[in-house]
Amino acid sequence: TSGVFDRGLNAGVRIADRLFSPRSMVKNAAQSALQKGARAAAQRAAVAAAENPATWPVIAVVIAIVVLGVIFFMLMDTNTMLAAAPYAKQNAVNTTTGTAPSPTLIQVPHAVTTIGPQLSPNPTTAASFPSLIPRGYGTAGQTWATMNPGYEEQTALPVQGYVTWYGRAGLMAEVATNQLAWGQITPCAECKGDISLMRQGDINRRVWIRRASGVVEGPYRVVDCAAKKDVATILKYKGWAADLSYEIAQNWGFKSEDVTIFDAPPTL
């Protein structure tokens, strides 16, 4: 009798295997449920069959109902189990390394936005485009304490603007003599003369001046700068570039022309 029920039970297991063979997780769960639930029912039915052989057909029907009921339950629960299976597989801990694999990220298509200008592989210097060269040393409202670069830093050249000059002959030479004695500047035999720029950080620089006519002169030595108290006023009336010595201005015909100041001889 027990052999009959075992064959019925095994038939149910094979049915589950055929139904769920592509889904190993569900198949194993179905087989386990059949083996636990149906075998218990089969054992109880076997006792009854031993006492009354006439009940075998009824017992067979009971077993079939149990098997089909378990299979039906597993079919109803398939969606939940299949949804959980990939997640469980993805997050399973590797028993060899003891680490969990990283989750797979889904790339969402989106528009690509370019931030800021793209630099040319062969950038052209600002000297090639006069319109890109800043005029003056800052903006109205700034002071010696708020200008950028700072008052004690070097000016980012080139800079363009108009020139003025010292009002007395020999005055720039006196300034240069004092600066040399104080160790603020060094001799420059090749320099064409001395000038004054805005920042204290520019003192002792060698610069070149491109005049309005396009003629480039230099180098000139920077020996003086604007007083701190005068910076705000100079920036308010934007456009000043340099003070020339009286002697240089004389050679230029005392013309307050627009110039461009470079830290090296311009190539154009």
Image (cartoon, rainbow, N blue to C red):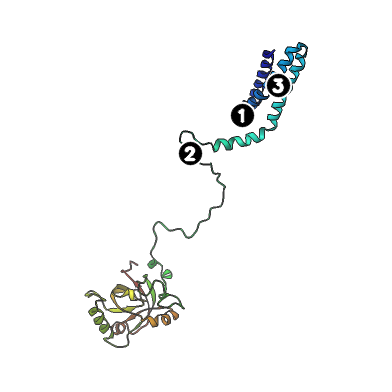
**Is residue 130 or residue 142 the one in the foreground?**
142
Q: Is residue 126 left or right of residue 3?
A: left
Mark 2 vs mark 3: give the one in front: 3
Residue 250 image offset from top left, x and y in percent: 30, 85
Q: Which residue is mark 1?
A: 23
What element does badge 1 sit on?
Answer: loop
Earlier-in-chain disc, 2 versus 3: 3
Q: Is residue 215 visible?
A: no
The amino acid beneath tag 1 is Arg
What element does badge 2 sit on?
Answer: loop
When asked about the image quadrant of residue 73, the answer is top right
Marks 2 and 3, how far apart at CA: 43 Å
Q: Residue at x 43, y 69 (%)?
A: 132
Q: Which residue is mark 2?
A: 99
Marks 1 and 2, how far apart at CA: 26 Å
When asked about the image quadrant of residue 128, the answer is bottom left
Query: Which numbered tag is attached to residue 41?
Result: 3
Q: Is residue 209 left or right of residue 143?
A: left
Q: Residue at x 72, y 26 (%)?
A: 69
Residue 106 image offset from top left, x and y in percent: 56, 44
Marks 3 and 1, how far apart at CA: 27 Å
The quadrant of the picture occupied by the C terminus is: bottom left
Earlier-in-chain disc, 3 versus 1: 1
The amino acid beneath tag 3 is Ala
Residue 254 image offset from top left, x and y in percent: 34, 85
What element does badge 3 sit on?
Answer: helix
The amino acid beneath tag 2 is Thr
Q: Residue at x 70, y 26 (%)?
A: 70
